[in-house]
């Protein structure tokens, strides 16, 4: 329960506007509606989900636009449970085993593969084919990261809106286990000598748009979460989760308005008091902004209302990489060896990452391929395949001329798919959509096309990241605010922001109603996160 009955009565009649129906906005809407608030969600797109949506293309092909799998669904299950519902009654999640295939490029083609699985004995067998000595350290890696996650759970659940939060009991307890001076790769060297094995436990930093050679060692917990708690496919695509959240929100009385854009956030004095939508004023007791932080905050909030994040600071912020995407409708089937998720890791992976972070377009790129039809027959018509291809590339600050290089880069990417056993894909393409960094900026309102928001370096995390309570009456959700990117973390951030909003409004009315507010995060329960 987010509120007591007295709290429901006290907050009844108070109004909140949520700007954006992405995963963070939808999770916030559910939690706020459950607390007795009147919630209106304004979404510029004609469907919910933001980048976490599934689209149907001509020919009957279905594609996830952004996230293609689900991690640690216990967080979202807890949100549904707080609303009196069971997640499994709304969405069918299939746990994948193997969760993905890792293909390592060598001098003369493929130098090895790992079929990643949460079955520790099978995983050790997979690793032993490449590096027998490394296989013996898998359980040690799991044990140490299990401890690391347990210490970091309380940190993930607390807001960092005060510098003293950096010295909270949870932070002080976690610090000895976080080793902030180490990178993910350096930390993994304590367990694994073979660079290919280290990549099996570090490529997940790409979910943050970061390099494992620079990303803080805290984020070894990303691969641990996958192996320990599983990788899931929502049947029908990740958009099925967004649609389920929106459906429940509507049944709880949330007013979701699609195809409308917010012009700006309104203020009375220093306090946010509503929004302007197409010339219409919507008054509210609080406003929640869900969107790409560096883009939306400058569009909606005057600079004088954000003294810690003025335009100059946002302009200098470190950003994640971008992605080059191919959504392909293919006539015919894929080879059985492709599996549901396959990652081709380039021969010189560290150089590949250095090029991306340094603004150079890699000519020997790593590639991620989702073949959702391997598990879910509803993603393409009979006899056809819907293929999702993602290539990490520099964001638009690099100055790459995509108009000029786009056609040749497409050919390069299709050529590299041959390493995954797909030699004849060009002649079988029946539908194609290309999304490059310009499209992320122009069609999806992503600042500089940086797909994974602000980078997650030490000086852009915790208190240094945009705060959940951004100002009086104004709250943030999404990958650009604390705790950060990835679906489970965004849902956790929505819980933090919703809790702060409810507490703030409740204090204005009757402080006693705070008794039933939760003091623990859903990460504190063992369960199965993106």
Image: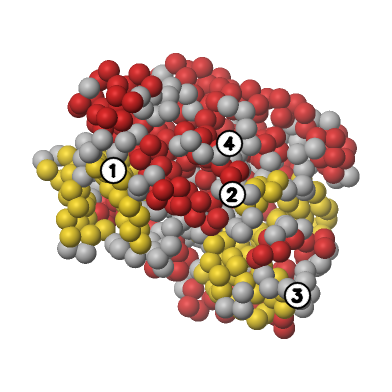
Q: Give percent across and percent down for residue 305.
A: 19, 44
Give the SS element for disc 1: strand
Q: Nearer the viewer, mark 2 or mark 3?
A: 2
Disc 1 to disc 2: CB gap under 8 Å: no
The answer to which image quadrant residue 20 occupies is: bottom left
Mark 2 packing: few (<14 Cα in 10 Å), some, or many (20+)? Answer: some
Q: Farthest residue in the bottom direction? A: 427
Q: On residue 383, which mark appears?
A: 3
Q: Farthest residue in the left direction? A: 269
Q: Nearer the viewer, mark 4 or mark 2?
A: 2
Q: Nearer the viewer, residue 183 or 26?
A: 26
Q: Give percent across and percent down for residue 525.
A: 58, 27
Identify the mark nearer the N-term, 3 or 4: 4
Identify the mark nearer the N-term, 4 or 2: 4
Is residue 193 in view? no
In space, the residues marked 3 and 1 are separated at their CA atoms by 47 Å
Q: Quadrant of the N terminus?
A: top left
Relative side of 409 to 334, left or right:
left
Identify the mark nearer the N-term, 1 or 2: 1
Q: On residue 91, which mark appears?
A: 2
Q: Which residue is mark 1?
A: 38
The residue under the point 38% across, 24% down is 517
């Amino acid at each position: 329960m987010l509120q007591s009955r007295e709290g429901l009565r006290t907050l009844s009649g108070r109004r909140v506007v949520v700007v954006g129906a992405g995963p963070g906005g939808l999770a916030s809407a559910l939690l706020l509606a459950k607390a007795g608030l009147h919630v209106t969600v304004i979404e510029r797109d004609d469907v919910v989900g933001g980048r976490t949506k599934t689209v149907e293309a001509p020919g009957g092909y279905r594609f996830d636009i952004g996230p293609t799998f689900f991690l640690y669904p216990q967080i979202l299950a807890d949100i549904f449970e707080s609303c009196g519902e069971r997640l499994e009654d709304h969405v069918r999640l299939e746990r994948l085993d193997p969760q993905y295939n890792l293909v390592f490029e060598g001098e003369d083609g493929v130098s090895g593969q790992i079929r990643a699985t949460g079955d520790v004995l099978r995983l050790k067998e997979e690793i032993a084919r490449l590096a027998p000595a490394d296989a013996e350290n898998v359980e040690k890696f799991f044990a140490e990261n299990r401890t690391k996650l347990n210490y970091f759970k309380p940190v993930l659940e607390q807001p960092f809106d005060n510098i003293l939060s950096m010295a909270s009991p949870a932070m002080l307890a976690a610090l000895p286990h976080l080793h902030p001076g180490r990178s993910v790769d350096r930390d993994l060297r304590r367990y694994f000598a073979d660079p290919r094995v280290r990549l099996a436990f570090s490529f997940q930093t790409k979910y943050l748009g970061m390099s494992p050679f620079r990303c803080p060692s805290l984020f070894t917990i990303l691969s641990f979460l996958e192996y320990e708690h599983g990788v899931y496919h929502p049947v029908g695509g990740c958009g099925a989760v967004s649609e389920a959240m929106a459906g429940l929100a509507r049944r709880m009385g949330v007013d979701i308005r699609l195809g409308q854009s917010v012009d700006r956030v309104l203020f009375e004095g220093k306090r946010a008091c509503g929004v302007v939508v197409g010339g219409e004023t919507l008054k509210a007791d609080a406003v929640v902004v869900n969107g790409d932080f560096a883009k939306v905050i400058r569009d909606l909030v005057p600079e004088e209302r954000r003294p810690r994040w003025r335009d100059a600071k946002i302009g200098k912020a470190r950003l994640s990489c971008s992605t080059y995407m191919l959504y392909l409708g293919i006539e015919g089937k894929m080879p059985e060896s492709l599996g549901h998720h396959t990652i081709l890791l380039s021969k010189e992976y560290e150089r590949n990452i250095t090029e991306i972070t340094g603004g150079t377009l890699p000519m020997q790129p790593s590639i991620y391929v989702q073949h959702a039809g391997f598990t879910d027959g509803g993603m393409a018509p009979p006899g056809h395949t819907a293929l999702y291809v993602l290539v990490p590339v520099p964001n638009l600050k690099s100055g790459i001329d995509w108009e000029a290089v786009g056609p040749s880069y497409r050919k390069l990417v299709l050529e590299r798919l041959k390493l995954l056993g797909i030699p004849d894909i060009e002649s079988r393409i029946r539908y194609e959509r290309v999304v490059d960094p310009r499209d992320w900026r122009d069609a999806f309102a992503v600042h500089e096309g940086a797909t994974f928001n602000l980078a997650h370096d030490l000086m852009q995390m915790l208190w240094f990241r945009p705060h959940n309570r951004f100002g009086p009456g104004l709250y943030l959700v999404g990958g650009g605010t604390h705790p950060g990117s990835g679906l489970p973390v965004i849902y956790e951030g929505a819980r933090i922001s919703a809790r702060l909003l409810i507490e703030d409004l409740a204090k204005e009315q009757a402080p006693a109603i705070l008794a039933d507010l939760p003091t623990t995060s859903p990460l504190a329960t063992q369960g199965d996160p993106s």
